[in-house]
Amino acid sequence: MQEARVLGTAVSTIKHESMVGSKMLIVQPFLADGETPDGFPLLTLDTVGAGKGDTVIITSDGKAMREQLQADATPARWSVTGIRD
C-alpha cells in the first residue's frame, strides 16, 4: 500500500468488461515522506468515492481487485482502498 494524491479522473469510451461502471482516477504516488513524488502518475480504479485533491491509499493487490470487481480476470492493477482524513 502507498499514499497518493488524486490529480483527476480519466474517461474511456471502451473498457474491459470487468471495469464497466468503475470510476477511474489518475493519482500521483508519494514516497514515505508524503511529499516527494514516487515515479509517474498511475491509473487506478476508485472503490471508495475519492475526488480530485484527496490523499488516498492505493494498492496493487490483484486478488483484492478481482474480488472487488467480481471478475475471474481483469487488466486493472491499481485500486484506491481508502481516503486519508
Image: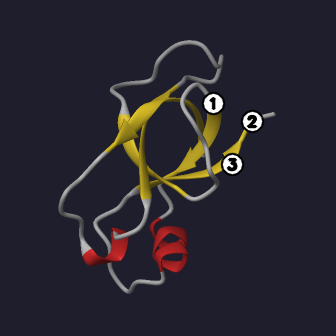
Which residue lies at the image location 56% right of the left edge and 23% below the top edge? 31
Which residue lies at the image location 45% right of the left edge and 23% below the top edge? 38
Which of the marked residues, 2 or 1, is nearer the chain's N terminus? 1
Q: CA distance from mark 3 to mark 1?
A: 10 Å
Residue indicated by mark 3: 82
Q: Are marks 2 and 1 in contact (CB under 8 Å)?
A: yes
Q: CA distance from mark 2 to mark 3?
A: 7 Å
Residue indicated by mark 1: 54
Query: Where is residue 43 drawn, in percent x and y?
Result: 36, 44
Q: Residue furthest top?
A: 36
Residue indicated by mark 2: 84
Query: Where is residue 51 drawn, in percent x and y?
Result: 58, 37
Amino acid type at image mark 1: Asp
In the displayed structure, 58 sits above or below 52; it is: below
In the displayed structure, 33 sits above or below 51; it is: above
In the displayed structure, 46 sits above or below 3; it is: below
Query: Where is residue 72 drawn, in percent x and y?
Result: 38, 86
Amino acid type at image mark 3: Gly
Q: How is the rendered protein coloured?
A: secondary structure
Asked where in the image residue 85 lies, by quadrant, the reply is: top right
In the displayed structure, 41 sits above or below 76; it is: above
Front residue of 47 and 30: 47
Q: Are marks 3 and 1 in contact (CB under 8 Å)?
A: no
Q: Nearer the viewer, mark 3 or mark 1?
A: 1
Q: Nearer the viewer, mark 2 or mark 1?
A: 1
Which of the marked residues, 3 or 1, is nearer the chain's N terminus? 1
- Helix, strand or loop at mark 2: loop
Asked where in the image residue 39 lies, by quadrant, the reply is: top left
- Helix, strand or loop at mark 3: strand
